[in-house]
Amino acid sequence: MYRDNSLVPSEAIRLLALGLLAEGGCSYAEVASEVRHFTGRMVGPSLDLLASPLELLKVEGLVEPVEPGDTSETAQLKITAAGRTELQRLLASNLRPQVTDVNKLIIALKMRFLNNLAVEQRLEQADLLVEIFERELARLTDLRSHGPANGGDLPAWLDLEIGATQARLAWFADLRDRLCAA
């Protein structure tokens, strides 16, 4: 079966929860609150981003209570070795070629938790992001050059999108250069 190794929305939520716990222990309620806050600010309310119960992370052995046997909602959780492996897998995943709201969320998560990867893996992710924005820029530029001359406000809007994409491409190329120098 073909799998492009790109994250689906539920995996973005897993990445966020595991990344938060990799930064230090916090309670189930704190993780749930931060997941809601971060996703809500990045993409707004979305049915695609309803988190599967974070309890599933415990069942799968990816997180565990700091105090064994503590099952209260205020129990401090910590990431397990299996959780760190899953976090690494999620961080190293691909992105879909088009820049969508979910991809923007995944890019933000990768940037937030990129320090959990080895330098070589960070560089691979920077290369991936540079490629994505190069393709996005080519797509928008092609659309702009083939659009009707009197396309209403579309040409001006495309110019805005092209400018934003050029800025993102430059930022990720700079990130890649900084990682190469490290």
Image: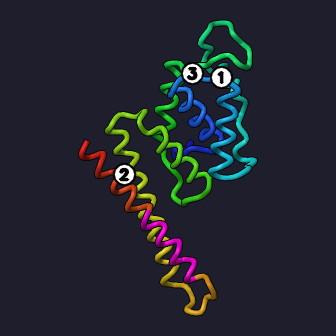
Residue drawn 61% across the image and 38% down it: 11
- Of tags 1 and 2, the one toward the viewer is 1
First to last magenta residue range: 155-167
Residue drawn 51% across the image and 31% down it: 87
Q: Nearer the viewer, residue 138 or 51?
A: 51
Q: Is the residue 4 above or below the residue 87 in the image?
A: below
Amino acid under label 3?
A: Gly
**Considering the image in quadrants, where does the C terminus appear?**
top left
The residue at which mark 1 appears reads as 27
Q: Is the residue 62 above or below the residue 179 in the image?
A: above
Dot 3 falls on a residue whose secondary structure is: loop
Q: Verify CB contact (< 8 Å) between mark 1 and mark 2.
A: no
Residue 61, located in which quarter of the rendered image?
A: top right
The residue at which mark 3 appears reads as 25
**Considering the image in quadrants, where does the N terminus appear?**
top right
The residue at which mark 2 appears reads as 127
Residue drawn 59% across the image and 92% down it: 150
Does the segment drawn in magenta span residue 11? no
Q: Whole-percent x and y of residue 132?
A: 45, 58
Q: Nearer the viewer, residue 24 or 162?
A: 24
